[in-house]
Image (cartoon, grey):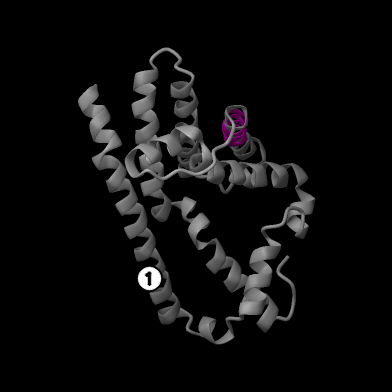
Amino acid sequence: MHTIYNFVSGPLVWASFIIFIGGTIYKLFNMGFLVKKKDVAVYAYASPYFGFRSIFRWLVPFSTLNMRKRPLLTVVSFVFHICVLALPIFVLGHISLINESWNIRWPHLPDPVSDAMTIIVIASCIFFVVRRKVMPEVKFLTETSDYLILAMVAAPFITGTWAYNQFAGYKIATILHMLSGEILLAAIPFTRLSHMIFYPFTRGYMGSEFGAVRHVRDW
């Protein structure tokens, strides 16, 4: 088990970061190439004003019609994304490991807050699964990959709290936690999780088209 731990906590960490960074750069260049090839007019009507206006508008809870129509989904989505992005960066365990390796550290979240955010992420994933199961208009558009992605997101948080609280089998959970986190990181550029990277571009595109071309709001 010690050999597996060293492998997962060493080479696989670097591999996941290389795939994430390399995949992101590739996808960005590929997106730029496709736009230039198929819809070159995008560059002509791209508007920083309307683009940034749309980006920031959609980052504010209940600032769009769709958000106001679905208040529960809006609250769950915003809280879920905040927890998913902030917790891995500010949880004590991750900061301690980075400090041991690089002598770098920054403020961490109190343990009760980290625990609450972990529960929120897991509960939100369950909410999204149930929503895809019971709402006909969402179920119609749901594919198997959507459930797989939710499982990939939930896995590092489930195994993380399992390992941190040292429940039975926590040594295995520690390895699974690192492995699931690495799989999640490497998958981001190549799955629907890439929306976290491409959000500024897609939102900027929509904002420019609606604002600069159609002269209407995109919210």
152 vs 99, nearest the viewer: 99
Q: Residue at x 49, y 59 (%)?
A: 197
Q: Is residue 7 left or right of residue 40?
A: left
Report x, y in % for residue 83.
Answer: 59, 41
Q: Residue at x 70, y 69 (%)?
A: 218
Q: In which quadrant will I find the C terminus?
A: bottom right
Report x, y in % for residue 5.
Answer: 27, 28
26 vs 16, nearest the viewer: 16
Q: Is residue 209 at all visible to an observer of this figure?
A: no
When the figure is inspected, residue 81 is found, relative to residue 36, above or below; the finding is above
Q: Residues within 10 Å of mark 1 (few under 14, many from 20)?
A: few
Q: In which quadrant will I find the N terminus?
A: top left
The span picked out in magenta is: 115-126
Report x, y in % for residue 173.
Answer: 39, 23
Q: Residue furthest top?
A: 168
The residue that disc 1 covers is 29
Q: Quadrant of residue 159?
A: top left
160 vs 40, nearest the viewer: 160
- Does residue 30 belong to the magenta stretch? no
> Which amino acid type corresponds to the residue marked 1 in the rendered image?
Phe
